[in-house]
Amino acid sequence: MDCLFCKIINGDIPSTKVYEDDKCYAFRDISPQGPTHILVIPKEHIQSVNEINDANKDTVGHIFTVISKIAKEEGIAEEGYRVVSNIGEYGQQTVPHLHFHIIGGRNMKWPPG
Ligand code: 5GP
Ligand code: ZN
């Protein structure tokens, strides 16, 4: 399948791995929006949140336990962080393979101060 993140899972495109198990893969975003910016993706190709259903909900639930674990390991859990999933055109989703951004290590307050 001609999908960037499927190629990353298969190792056809290199990435900096943070975590992996039979259901999901986590790696550092190539263009980080904060000191910590990790993407967590299902190994199964799911296009977006719109395609979450009863058949794949256990994988998605599992991904959130992984997100919680990664945040602690990265040392951002206590101060706080963001989990973001962009969906479709208006959501500015650029890669059509479900992914959850973990962004942290800085205060998201806007305007700053
Ligand atoms: P989206 O805009 O779809 O929510 O997020 C896609 C994310 O994937 C972006 O934050 C972008 O920086 C990241 N990204 C795109 N191509 C690559 C790549 O080849 N490697 C890695 N590690 N991240 C990528
Ligand atoms: Zn894919």
Image (cartoon, rainbow, N blue to C red):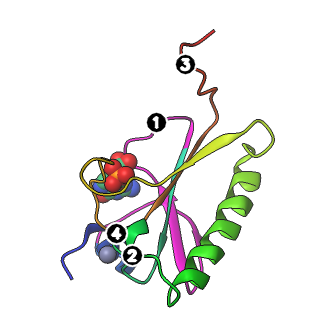
From this view, report whether residue 64 is shown above or below residue 38. below
Whether residue 105 sits left or right of residue 86 in the image: it is right
> Which residue is painted at 33% across and 72% down in the image?
47
Of tags 4 and 2, the one toward the viewer is: 2
Q: Position of residue 30 (x, y in %)?
A: 38, 48
Q: Alpha carbon of mark 1 to alpha carbon of mark 2: how far?
A: 26 Å
Q: Give the amino acid type for the residue marked by disc 4 in the picture.
A: His
Q: Give the amino acid type for the residue marked by disc 2 in the picture.
A: Glu
Whether residue 6 sits left or right of residue 62 in the image: it is left
Q: Residues within 10 Å of mark 3 (few under 14, many from 20)?
A: few
From this view, report whether residue 52 is shown above or below residue 69. below
Mark 3, secondary structure of its residue = loop
Read off the residue under disc 2: 51
Q: Residue furthest left?
A: 2
Q: Position of residue 9 (x, y in %)?
A: 40, 76
Q: Alpha carbon of mark 4 to alpha carbon of mark 2: how far?
A: 10 Å
Read off the residue under disc 1: 33
Give the extent of the magenta segment.
13-36
Report if residue 21 lies within the magenta region: yes
Of tags 3 and 2, the one toward the viewer is: 2
Picture disc at residue 97: 4
Q: Residues within 10 Å of mark 2 (few under 14, many from 20)?
A: few
- Using the image as rendered, state which of residue 75 and residue 11 is in the foreground: 75
Q: Residues within 10 Å of mark 1 (few under 14, many from 20)?
A: some
Mark 1, secondary structure of its residue = loop
Q: Give the amino acid type for the residue marked by disc 1 in the picture.
A: Gln
Whether residue 44 sits left or right of residue 84 in the image: it is left
